[in-house]
Image (spheres, rainbow, N blue to C red):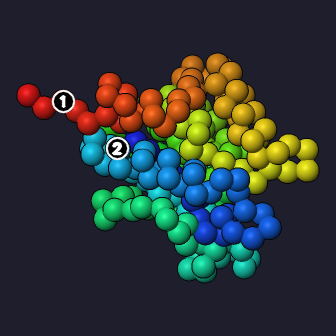
Amino acid sequence: MKPALLVIDVQQGLCEGVGAAFDCAGTIARINQLSRAARAAGAPVVLIQHESQGDYLRHGSRPWQLADGLETAPTDLRLAKTTPDSFHKTELEGLLRGLGVDTLIICGMHGEFCVDTTCRRALALGWPVLLAQDAHTSAGNAALTPQQVIAHHNATLTGISSFGPRVQAWPTEALVAPGGPLAPAATA
């Protein structure tokens, strides 16, 4: 398995104010754990940032910046997007194919929008997805609490079978555990 970790929209504007996502600090801590493990295993870490035309998440603005507490490294790859689909009108597909990636580990913010859409598009493009079930979050909406949105997407995305490749929901601890997809390769 040659995985890549996609960290989607972990941006300051989604972590503060009235529309702040649920448990940002805990989610970021788990994403940091995944990122550290990915780097140690030699897997690419792709930091994806949403950019909007208006004031909210405008390129270079404080809300657009990566969230406080998110650990990054000089080796991390960065990608800008303007839609919920991290592949749409971006270089992500070519980048991943060029790196020989065969599996995507996905985490990030707003599970019902960008995480969901990117998971579905990854399946359509032929990549199996390991969804970090405890490392994506939401602010919820008028019908569902954030916890319900998270649980719904963990259940719904794993039920999609029509593309061939599947989504599996894994807890962070299993993804980074010895023998897990982000465990460092054994050296002889």
Please give the name of the residue rendered at 42% of the width and 45% of the height, measured from the top-left corner. 34
User: Within 10 Å of the Cα at label 2, are there few (<14), some (14-19), or many (20+) other Cα atoms?
Assistant: many
Which residue is identified by label 2? Answer: 37
**Residue holding disc 1:** 186
Distance of mark 2 from mark 1, alpha carbons? 14 Å
Instruction: Determine whether, in the image, residue 139 is placed left or right of residue 64.
Output: right
Q: Secondary structure at mark 2?
A: helix
Q: Is residue 11 above or below residue 29?
A: below
Q: Quadrant of residue 102?
A: top left
- Amino acid identity at mark 1: Ala
> Which image quadrant: the N terminus?
top left
**Residue 20 falls left or right of residue 69:** right
On the image, the x and y values in percent for residue 151 come to 72, 34
Name the amino acid type tagged 2.
Ala
Residue plotted at (48% across, 62% down) = 70
The x, y position of residue 116, in whole percent, is: 67, 41
**Residue 39 vertical position relative to residue 124 in the rendered view, above or below:** below
